Image: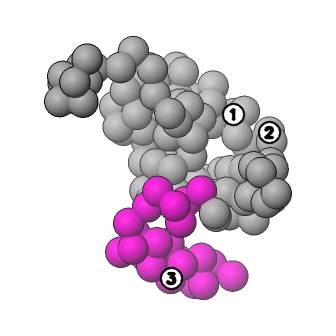
Amino acid sequence: MSPEANMNTTASWQFLTNYALVLMHTSQRPESTGMEIAQAVGITERATRRILVDLQAAGYVELEKVGRRNRYRVDTHQPLGRIGDRDLTVGNLLELVLDKELREERVRDDGERE
């Protein structure tokens, strides 16, 4: 099959898991609702809420109540594991996949909260 034909096919899988996608979305838009996150990631709201609970339990995300809404804070220092000879953190992943403007915005936000 030619490379051009290969580009037109839709894969039935993704490189990043739903957990990574939820984590990335909440790092960019910490005040998103469960429904907004679900729609952005392409999963159900129920699955999104389950993932957020798991991410909180593992220490990757902190939940702050702001009135009736939630605000999520992603801990960029949490380890993701070892890839090759390097230990990676959540921050390393976000730097890799987020564009420069969003990274700078996240750094400004982190500085204001600390």
Q: Which residue: 56% across, 31% down?
A: 17
Q: Secondary structure at mark 3?
A: helix
Q: Is residue 73 left or right of residue 33?
A: right
Query: Is residue 99 on the magenta stretch?
Result: yes
- Residue 56: x, y in percent? 73, 43
Q: Answer above or below: position of 83 versus 102.
A: above
Q: Which residue is mark 1?
A: 53
Between 105 and 56, the residue placed more toward the observer is: 105
Q: Answer above or below: position of 111 versus 81.
A: below
| Crowd around label 1: few <14 · some 14–19 · many ≥20 (10 Å) | some
- Residue 21: x, y in percent? 50, 40
- Disc 1/disc 3 C-alpha distance (Å): 26 Å
- The kind of secondary structure the magenta stretch mainly shows is helix
Q: Quadrant of residue 47?
A: top right
Q: Is residue 19 left or right of residue 39?
A: right
Question: Which part of the image, by quadrant, shows the N terminus?
Answer: top left
Q: Which residue: 57% across, 41% down?
A: 20
From which residue to which does the magenta span run? 93-114
Query: Is residue 101 on the magenta stretch?
Result: yes
Q: Which residue is mark 2?
A: 57
Q: Which amino acid does the dot numbered 1 rest on?
A: Val
Say whether disc 2 or disc 3 marks the residue closer to the N-terminus.
Answer: 2
In the rendered structure, are the residues bearing label 1 and label 2 in contact, judged by CB atoms less than 8 Å apart?
A: yes
Residue 66 appears in the rendering: no
Nearer the camera: disc 1 or disc 3: 3
Q: Which residue is mark 3?
A: 108
Q: Is residue 20 left or right of residue 29?
A: right
Q: Which amino acid does the dot numbered 3 rest on?
A: Arg
Q: Which residue: 52% across, 20% down?
A: 46
Q: Secondary structure at mark 2?
A: helix
| Crowd around label 3: few <14 · some 14–19 · many ≥20 (10 Å) | few
